[in-house]
Every structure is written in structure tokens, then in C-alpha cells.
Amino acid sequence: MVKETYPGLLPMQIAKHYGFPLQYTGKEQSIAIISLGGEINMDELKKDFQAMRVPMPDIKVVLVEPESITTEQNQMPSGETHLDVEVIGSICPEAKITIYRGPNPSGLAAAVKKAVADKNSVISISWGASEISSDHNSEMESVLENAIKEGVTVCVSAGDGGSSDSRNVADADGKAHVGYPASSHHVLACGGTELLMKNGERSEVVWNNSNIGRGATGGGVSQLFGLPSWQSSAGIKIPSINTGKIGRVIPDVAGLAAGGDWKIYQSDKAVLIGGTSAVAPLWASLIALINEARAESGKSQLGFVNERLYDLAANGDLFTDITIGNNKSAPNYPGYDATSGFDACSGWGTPIGSKLFEALTKLE
């Protein structure tokens, strides 16, 4: 019998699940978290880290365009930011973590711009919108292009609305869509998996809990951006299920995302949570650990990693290939299936941490 299983693992347990190099701690690394949510209570965060038995990292909050942050936004939930900071703070406890909090939704580009200007080496973004509703692409693209010039790795969640990029399929237009900024050529797009239990053994498959109203991984083919050279060089040519045209495919990589896979703390209480919002900070953490090791060897930080990552992935055993599942928002909704190799549900798959760490650390 096959059944879904939601283990409620702490961030460090998930890092161990993927074989992250936990002898490293993010020392001397600067990691930015973009937040468009509610106000952050640092005393509460301190208690939450204590509950996880993790030392409180060096965390500060920078307000971006504070005059545009409304009272209503201050009263919004801050669970999204809690998830990001508790993932990164657990895996990289010695890193300098800065939360850049801007107005929702207009402050995304400004927050990322400030994070780049402040010389963070890695940025984690768990926010976005469907490409068809994004109206800040020109500004954001300029900011992300500058991040590449400054050697910054930007990790972005692929979204939780499945192939429609809508959490409520009844509101969708019957077509497949991907989210932005995940679809940008300038970011590492992070999709989601979940665990199934069969005959007492766990296997990882595409995250799709749409049947119970609990989301599915974003993924598919961009309508805004053509196929980047590093996907073309890897032989990736997945046609849009809408038009048959070839374009930028997301996600690039994946990690556990089902609601209940992750356990964090809020207000000193355990909370089971998930979403690709957990996968972006997971990958940001891994990049920071690799940057720490590279610094020890006198090498530069990874910066924009996609070109080299795709080259390595196409020629090496660095990922666990996810071959089961789909991201259809409903059984008959247009979407994408997992396949052997790269696909539009899980990208290259989930990281084999030790091998990926070694390969990316060795790069000149």
C-alpha cells in the first residue's frame, strides 16, 4: 500500500536527509531573506530557536520603503518569514542573516536591490506572483541582472499553486502558468517534492496535494522568457502545454515541500508547515555552506550558479532524480509530469548534498 507521509522534520533533520555538509556552519557568510509579510518579533524568534535547541543566529531586520508599509501589513502573519529564517538559521547558525522587509506587494524589487547593495552573497525569496499578473518584471529583471554582476546567488520558490499557479483552481483560467521571479533567467528556481511510504520505505515524488486542497509545486514553461543558453546546452526543450512553444523551464532544482514535511516553531509552539517557500531557504543554506568552504580555499563565492550547475547535473550523479508524479492543479488540468532526468515538476531533482557540495566547491 502506498500512502503519503508527513514526517514533521526540523530543518537540521531535512539537511541531514539530503546529506548537507554540516561540519560547516555558514561562518562569515551573509544571507538575505526577502519578506513582504507581517512585523517580525525578535523576542519571539529567540524563543523559537530555543525551542528548536538551536543557538539564536545573528539576525537583523532592515525596513525597505518603510513609509509604504501599512498598519494592515504589520498585522499580517509572519509565518512565511519565520519559515525562511528558521531554516537558514538552523543550517547556517554562524551566518549573518538579514531580513529585508518591504511593502507588499510593491516592495519586492526594492528589497532585493537593497540586499544586493549590502553585499549579501545569497538571497532567499519565497514571494512571487503568476507571470500573467506580475507588473514589475522590467524593474525586477534589472535588479536581478545586477545581482549576477555582483556575484550573488538568488534562490526563489517556484510557487505552491501547481501547474495553474493558483491555490484555488476554481479561479484559474484553464491554462498552465509559472510564477515570477522564479521564471527569470537570473535565479535558481526551487520546486517541491513530498514523501510517500510503500512497504515500509519512503520514496520522494513530486509534491501534489491538490486533491486535498493543500497545494502543489509550481513548474512549467515560461510565457515571458525564452530558453536560456544553459538549458539549451543541457538538451532541455520542454514545450509549453499551452502553446507548444519552447521557453524557460522551472524549477531548476527541488526539495521537500509538502505541508507537514517541515516542523518549525512560532510563538514557542511547534508548527507543521511546507511549501516551496521552504525549499528556497534550504537551497540558499546549501549555497552558503559551499561558499564558506570555497572561501577557506581562497575561491570566490559561487554567484550565479545555473550555468555550471546544469553542466554538472547533465554529466554527473549529483541529484536524486524524481520520476513519479505531476503538478496538475486538478486531475484534468493541463500540467507537467515527472520523467527520468530533468522535468518541469522537479528540475534536476533533490540534492545529493555531499556530492553536490564537493563538485561546486571544486569549481574555479
Image (tube, helix red, strand yellow):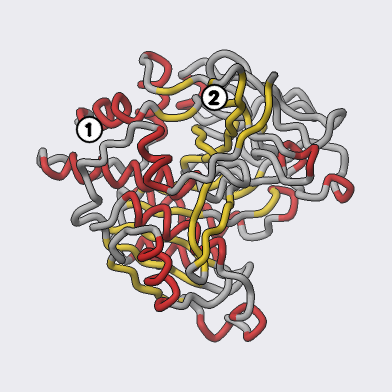
Q: Looking at the image, which is closer to me, 84 or 273?
A: 273
104 to the left or right of 27: right
One can see residue 97 in this view: yes
User: Which mark, residue 361?
Assistant: 1
Instruction: Bin the neighbour count of mark 2 within 10 Å (Cα to Cα): few under 14, some 14-19, many 20 and up.
Output: some
Tag 1's secondary structure?
helix
Look at label 2 and name its amino acid. Arg
Q: Residue at x 76, y 48 (%)?
A: 166
Q: Position of residue 222 (x, y in %)?
A: 66, 37
Residue beneath label 2, please?
202
Front tag of 2 and 1 = 2
Q: Residue at x 76, y 32 (%)?
A: 328
Look at label 1 and name its amino acid. Thr
Q: Residue at x 76, y 49 (%)?
A: 167
Q: Looking at the image, which is closer to me, 132 or 340?
A: 340
305 to the left or right of 104: left
The correct choice, above or below, for 320 with respect to 290 in the image is above
Q: Position of residue 190 (x, y in %)?
A: 52, 40
